[in-house]
Image (cartoon, helix red, strand yellow):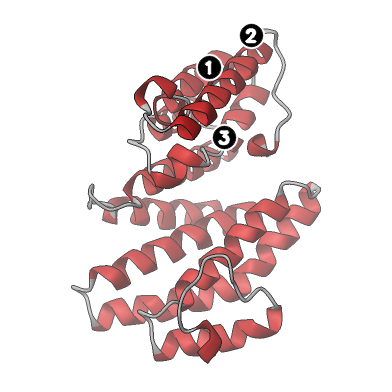
């Protein structure tokens, strides 16, 4: 694993035969780059899942649990041994978040998914962390999707709006948020709530007036146009068909 010892986000070991090596390296060095590689591998799964059928999507996420759960166990043990290590704590929370999402998508026990997601949110206290805004958004999105599956529509709507109130993050501000819970609620007819959510995410993703760099301002302007087009569709009783909504 020497060639992977220095983490580079665009050079990720994706071959499934590398998974045992990554797990072994993580056990030997829990603070090394290995958890980051597994997170990047899971990020690729979330992208691939957008183009899959419901059955294919569930299978893809189910397969990811084969490497996510062991990694989660390894990091949990490392945190138990070093409870004050913030790096390990952050790595564990990230992996727990992945496990919760993959479990939901794979159709596993909702109570377990909800419990894990709430535990991640309860630990998310470092408001200065680069990942704080991501976790607020992702976990409330996850909890909203759980609530929908439990038939708790009002609770799901609250989670969507709470997710929209995230302070943002480097990733959310540039690549933008996921709109999967927004889509699920729009399909339930809750289009006014979804439009409110779109206005909230515009604060950090479609805000050209607050940006100074020319390209950043241009991209934010395009994002604003995209949000407005989605709002027009929603007002017409339609649900946007876009990769970010899948």
**Mark 1–mark 2 CB contact (< 8 Å):** yes
Q: Residue at x 67, y 64 (%)?
A: 62
Marks 2/3: CA–CA distance:
18 Å
Dot 2 crowding, Cα within 10 Å, few <14, some 14–19, many 20+: few
Query: Quick one: 25 or 115, which is closer to the camera?
Result: 25
Asked which secondary structure carries label 3, the reply is: helix
**Mark 2–mark 3 CB contact (< 8 Å):** no
Give the mark nearest the N terminus, 2 or 3. Answer: 3
Q: Residue at x 40, y 45 (%)?
A: 170
**Any part of residue 201 in sight:** yes
Marks 1/3: CA–CA distance:
12 Å
- Mark 1 or mark 3, whichever is nearer to me: 1
Disc marking residue 181: 3
**Going by the picture, which residue comes out furthest to the top?**
236
Instruction: Kindly indicate the quadrant of the structure image that contains residue 243.
Output: top right
Q: Which residue is mark 1?
A: 195
Q: Position of residue 67 (x, y in %)?
A: 58, 75
Disc marking residue 216: none
Q: Is residue 228 above or below residue 89?
A: above
């Amino acid at each position: 694993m020497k060639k992977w010892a220095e983490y580079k986000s665009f050079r990720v070991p994706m071959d499934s035969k590398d998974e045992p090596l990554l797990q072994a390296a993580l056990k030997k060095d829990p603070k090394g780059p290995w958890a980051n590689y597994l997170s990047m591998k899971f990020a690729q799964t979330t992208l691939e899942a957008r183009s899959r059928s419901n059955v294919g999507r569930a299978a893809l996420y189910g397969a990811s649990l084969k490497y996510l759960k062991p990694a989660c166990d390894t990091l949990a043990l490392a945190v138990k041994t070093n409870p004050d290590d913030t790096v390990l704590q952050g790595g564990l929370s990230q992996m727990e978040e992945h496990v919760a999402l993959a479990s939901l998508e794979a159709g596993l026990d909702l109570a377990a998914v909800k419990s894990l997601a709430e535990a991640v949110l309860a630990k998310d206290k470092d408001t200065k962390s680069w990942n704080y805004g991501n976790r607020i958004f992702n976990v409330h999105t996850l909890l909203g999707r759980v609530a929908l599956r439990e038939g708790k529509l009002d609770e799901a709507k609250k989670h969507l709006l709470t997710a929209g109130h995230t302070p943002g993050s480097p990733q959310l501000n540039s690549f933008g948020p996921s709109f999967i819970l927004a889509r699920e609620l729009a399909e339930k007819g809750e289009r006014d709530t979804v439009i409110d959510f779109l206005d909230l995410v515009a604060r950090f993703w479609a805000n050209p007036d607050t940006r100074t760099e020319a390209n950043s301002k241009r991209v934010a302007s395009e994002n604003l146009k995209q949000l407005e087009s989605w709002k027009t569709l929603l007002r017409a009783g339609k649900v946007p068909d876009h990769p970010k909504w899948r």
